Amino acid sequence: MGKVLMKGNEVIAEAAVHAGCKYFFGYPITPQSELVAYMARRLPEVGGLFLQAESEVAAINMVYGAAGTGVRVMTSSSSPGFSLKQEGISYLVGAELPALIVNVVRGGPGLGNIQPAQSDYFQVTKGGGHGDYHTPVLAPSTLQEIIDLTEAAFDIADRYRTPVILLGDGMLGQMMEPVEFKEWKEREPEQKEWATTGIRGDGKPRIISSLELNADALEKRNELLQKKFALIKQNEARYETFEIDDAEYIVTAYGTAARIALNAINKARKDGLKIGMIRPITLWPFPEQPFIETRDRVKGYLSVEMSAGQMVEDVRLAVEGRTQVSFFGRTGGVVPTQEEIFDQIVKLAGGVEV
Amino acid sequence: MTMKTVFEKTTGLTANQTHYCPGCTHGIIHRMVGEVLEEMGILEDTVGVASVGCSVLSYEYFNCDMTQAAHGRAPAVATGIKRVLPDRFVFTYQGDGDLASIGIAEAVHAAARGENITVIFVNNAIYGMTGGQMAPTTLVGQKTATTPFGRDGSIQGLPIRVSEMLSTLDGTAYIERVSTHDVPNIIKAKKAIRKAFETQKQGLGFSMVEVLSSCPTNWGLDPNESLDWIKDNMVPAYPLGVYKNSQKGDGR
């Protein structure tokens, strides 16, 4: 197909269309509004439907309704809007409905600003809404990777009947890079026997609900959900490593922070410092394996985040106190520079806790 | 001697026993909806959306595909379903706490968009499921758990007349307020429900039937007194009748 120069938000949208998504319900919010606008233009071309909802709350509930009919459906937002969607996400999990929810994160808390941030990590990985649950979270760090991960997100959603979150940030959403899409192929919509489309065939009504008034019965449902989460944990953890074999210290970062950290690591390597990197691609399930494999032989880890320190908690859990875990982050929409991260690496390699 | 069947239960409802309190008219309203779906022959083509509140379990009672929605969000959920399946019948079944309070935005905007869905709006002027608190439709002077001295308009605000309000929107095609306090009104109510589904069948846009209903438990009245209370107190505050009947589909 050849490479095209596109904006991150538009890449997510086109990737979703390529993945067979024909229904989008959304609400504008910076810095993801181009995604909404792209869908408004693009979906009618493929026989799909775009609808601008009156709020993020309505949008996620429209997604809930559409997901119940068995189609591939999505919504997108940015941090304050994503908070509003948490109600619906909890219901999607409870009713076991597949959908894609995109969060192009900006600085918070509250209205914050429209600059890139990673401060929604807790919210997306630890449940966010009410009840005991997790949603798979995929965090691309390049626009090309967005294409693969958007399709993967829909596949995971369908495979496990769960909402999946694609986590970007304002930088990924707003930047432009050349990307290449796979050959276009029309997808046959998957038939889902649980979908509520009007009684068909067996004559038995289908019910989609997350309500279970009996405590024992609800506990059983929760146990089934937990089994599903365990299965997702076992099967879907993704990560990428960079020069960890001889590394004395390992930097870990995801998304935009990982891109910048990689440049800092390359510079450190040129200066003879043995630094490697683990880049989580799924934030939930958190990829513990590369940390388990390295934690007894490296001198320390440095978690670099565009937050006050959120993923670092999962790194510490994976490392189980066997090695020192340091943290460096910027907040409020400030993007850390390559030089800042390099300085942190130098300090770390010099035995100074950062 | 063979017996001729002169009356039987509608196939629009399942065999499940409902959980509603004695004297509550939810059961009557359920049956009217079920009968209409059966009579129109559309049970197999219908997806209903249950709300939060007393009617939260209505998915157990209607004999069609059903989805349970979060509090107030039923019109948004119904929008999602109908936009994917425009040839199916989609209805929501919502109480006044659900529709007129937490879900007022979803109701207004589904109506404004002219969503081709049918809303069955059950107004009993109180929150039933949560134990008799004030609803947006609670009458001035009405005592509830959260208006123990009677609703005072200067403190708790004034009741919302949903049918009147939504009928001002261009996207609405058919809106009628009916009551369940006696048999003639119940017969009118069923006709209105049928008309609402026929409006949807013709693709004319948003249709809603507001049904005045009783809540003996939380009103602290017996079932007969409750029916009188609807007639004497609710009907004057919520006048019955057709508020919108645009059969041209001009709102779409």
Image: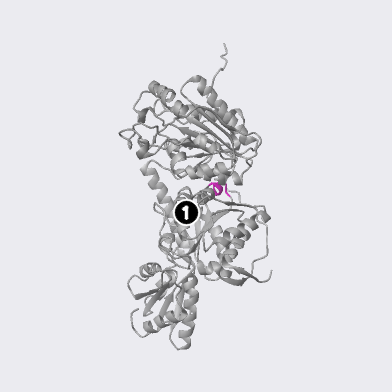
Q: Amino acid at mark 1?
A: Lys
**In the image, which residues are magenta?**
A65-70
Q: Where B244 sits versus A319, above or below?
A: above
Q: Determine the residue positioned at 43% across, 31% down.
A: B124
Residue B95 position (above or below residue A130): above
**Please, which residue is most extreme toward the bottom here?**
A271
Q: Nearer the viewer, residue B174 or A74?
A: B174
Q: Report if residue B136 lies within the magenta region.
A: no
Query: Which of the 4 image quadrants contains residue A341?
Result: bottom left
Percent x, y of residue A123? 42, 60
Relative to A296, residue A284 above or below: above
**Dot 1 falls on which chain?**
A
Residue located 64% across and 52% down the image = A48
Residue A288 is situated, as x and y percent measured from the top left of the image, at: 42, 68
Residue A66 colored in magenta in the image: yes
Residue A169 in the image: above or below residue B92: below
Q: Could you say where residue A99 lies in the image, as x and y percent from the top left?
A: 53, 54
Name the residue tied to disc 1. A85
Q: Is any atom of residue A204 visible in this view? A: no
Look at the image and tell me in which quarter the C terminus of chain B lies: top right
How was the colour assigned to the protein in this rendering? Answer: one colour
Q: Quadrant of residue A332?
A: bottom left
Q: Callout 1 environment at 10 Å: few (<14), some (14 to 19), or many (20+)?
A: many
Dot 1 falls on a residue whose secondary structure is: helix
Q: Residue at x 37, y 82 (%)?
A: A348
Q: How many marks?
A: 1
